[in-house]
Image: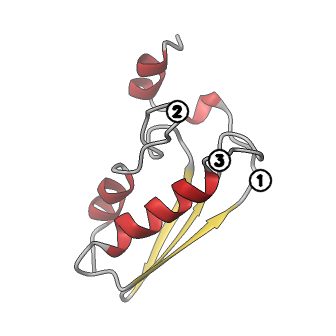
Amino acid sequence: MATDTELIEALKQVIDPELMVNIVDLGLIYSVDQTERKVAVQMTLTSPACPAGPQIVQQAKMALERLEDVDEATITITLSPPWTPDRMTDDAKDMLGIF
């Protein structure tokens, strides 16, 4: 099985094309669960009408499935709880000029 760190690092490779910050640092990832060689991710988007949503979901799935120990990744979008900038890491806030 892939480690939690490997899964998170794979997801960090997915960049929100509008904000140019990875989805982990943006706080879009709510949970990552692995059972044997399958990974289930629950995540959100910065807004319900995010035009990049399908692209982000596909890239997250592909990033995880590139890992040697992952055969299948399922990405589920939830809007509850809604995303807020408070979920962002300090690095992401710095990159976007939020203080």
Closer to the camera in the image, 68 or 2? 68
Q: Do the residues labelled 3 and 2 touch (CB within 8 Å)?
A: no
Q: Residue at x 53, y 14 (%)?
A: 98
Q: Which of marks 1 and 3 is nearer the N terminus?
A: 3
- Mark 1 is surrounded, within 10 Å at the Cα level, by few (under 14), some (14 to 19) or many (20 or more) other residues, namely few
For the residues marked 2 and 1, what is the alpha-carbon distance in whole angstroms?
Answer: 16 Å
For the residues marked 3 and 2, what is the alpha-carbon distance in whole angstroms?
Answer: 12 Å
Residue 37 in the figure: left or right of residue 97:
left
Select label 3 or label 2 by which is in front: 3
Query: Can residue 51 be seen here?
Result: yes
The circle on residue 45 is 3
What residue does disc 2 label?
88
Please say if 61 is above or below 85.
below
Residue 36 lies, in percent from the top left, at 37, 89
Looking at the rendered structure, the kind of residue marked 3 is Leu
Residue 84 lies, in percent from the top left, at 68, 33
Chosen colour scheme:
secondary structure
Q: Are marks 1 and 3 in contact (CB under 8 Å)?
A: no
Q: Is mark 3 on a helix, strand or loop?
A: loop
